[in-house]
Amino acid sequence: MTSLTIVSARTSKQVCLLGTAILFLAGFCFSQPAISLSPTDGPPTSSLRVSGSGFAPNAKIDIYFGTQDEAVAMADSKGSFSQIAIPAPASTLPGTHWVSAVERSGHTGAQATFLVSTSWSQYHRNNMRRWNPYENVLNVNNVGSLHRKWNFTTGNAVYSSPAVAHGVAYIGSTDSNLYALKTGTGAKLWSYATGSTLLSSPAVANGAVYFGSADYNFYALNASTGALLWSYPTGNPVYSSPALVNGVVYFGSFDSNVYALNASTGAKVWSYATGGSVYCSPAVANGVVYVGSWDHNMYALNASTGALLWSYPTGGQISSSPAVANGRVFAGSDDNKVYALNASTGALLWSYTTGTFADSSPAVADGVVYVGSDDGNLYALNASTGALLWSYYTGILGIGGPALANGVLYVGGSFHAVNALKASTGALLWSYRTSENIESSPAVVNGVVYVGSEDGNVYAFRLKEGLEKTEANAKRPGLNTIRPDFNLKVSLPVATRSGPEF
């Protein structure tokens, strides 16, 4: 072989290696675009943070929710951008939706999915008002077409109210079990047996479900498997439904104490002794725990320390779980009155007299308090003045109380029925009869109403097929079909995550 041939071979090899290196670097420098979302799920009006990489350097990038252009990002010299905020529109229905990021100069882009979903994770909901502000499937015009989606039969009466989160409905029964049911079918995922009846309504957060039992214990279970995480013994039955806020779970016991426990470990943070049994669920707002006792008093306690801030005496036992809204605390008492107190001072703002015990827990929204009485009536009261707006006779309401979503009020009663009323007038829009009374308070989530009955069943109701307008599993938009909004200006990254509670 001549030296020229050897040099040529070496040169060809070097050229080949050089070409391979150039192609590798080109692939490295100009990788396929990709985006990530934070969070990846939430209710309508959620604020999403969109970040991306692999785009052309210094390119303008339109960010779409569905086909709506919501923001424009400017890529840096490496083709990346981060923390661009866009909203999930309030009208977005439950289901999977697509977020797209597309270079304005062409159709190069990337897509990711966002799951629109609402939860009812504890008795009060996180807003302490028994009100779901994100419901956009059921409304006053279509709720009359609800029908039974499924029912699940437990071994005894169900007074507990459901908590619904991540596709699972959790509810207790007087057969001593807590059940986890698949929201789509009602199929049992697991059950956990305690030593006695369950009236407490569960709370769900961070992969755990919390509830009390008449066996004198408070429990935390793995929400996916039902495995026991920890339990805490009290001196008497726990009928109170827990409130979970900032890693602390608050509840009352018939041993007259209000407890605050570390939600992760079950360690006691503090307890406060009242003068009587504590039946109701505490409400926690702005660093204060509000709770009533059978010693006839409403208490406000420091949520961090349990120190007494104020108390207000009523003329009877308080079983009604308080609701907190706009600087006011609303609750009923066995002295036949509904009270509105100043949340900061405990001063009486107004009271409304019903026909007998006001044991029902109120729901509050849009300047109206909805509360029931054992006189059989559901009352709608002006939240500022206590003036009666309307009343509706359901039979004895018991302790469950109404739930409110998208202008519709859902409530049970002693006529074996769960009812849907128009919140503005009290007009009956829909009713479903079970074989026994309903004292469980409904939960309304993603177009489905969940409730328990004394007949031992848990029920789920949804719109009949063909009547429900839904965008569930929305079609993936083509990057070459969506059009930019040239009126949008470049958005700056946001430093912190903020979104609605759900």
Image (cartoon, rainbow, N blue to C red):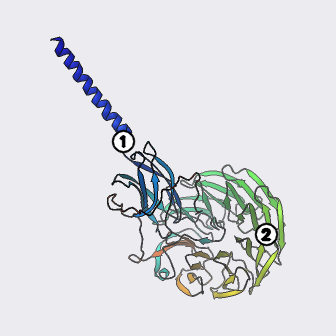
Q: Quadrant of the C terminus?
A: bottom right
* Mark positioned earlier in the residue sequence (1 or 2): 1
Q: Which residue is mark 2?
A: 293
Proximity of marks 1 and 2: CB atoms separated by less than 8 Å? no
Q: Secondary structure at mark 2?
A: loop
Relative to 233, 460 lies left or right: left
Q: Is residue 414 above or below residue 264?
A: below
Is 414 displayed left or right of 84 in the figure? right
Above or below: residue 80 compared with residue 374: above
The quarter of the rendered structure image containing the N terminus is: top left
**SS class of the residue under badge 1?**
loop
Q: Amino acid at mark 2?
A: Ser
Please name the residue shown 45% across and 48% down the image. Answer: 75
Q: Residue at x 38, y 46 (%)?
A: 56
Q: Is residue 75 visible?
A: yes
Residue 230 image offset from top left, x and y in percent:
66, 51
Farthest residue in the top direction?
Answer: 2
Q: Position of residue 189 (x, y in %)?
A: 50, 59
Numbered disc in front, either 1 or 2: 1
Q: Could you tell me the amino acid type at mark 1?
A: Phe
43 on left or right of 3: right
The picture quadrant where one finds residue 428 is bottom right
User: Disc number at residue 325?
Assistant: none
State the CA–CA distance, disc 1 to disc 2.
66 Å
| Number of residues whose C-alpha sits closer than 10 Å to that of mark 1, classed few (under 14), some (14–19) or many (20 or more) | some
Res. 373 image quadrant: bottom right
Q: Which quadrant of the figure has residue 347?
A: bottom right
The disc placed on residue 30 is: 1
Residue found at x 62% / y 83%: 414
Q: Position of residue 421 (x, y in %)?
A: 57, 83
**Closer to the camera in the image, 360 or 409:** 409
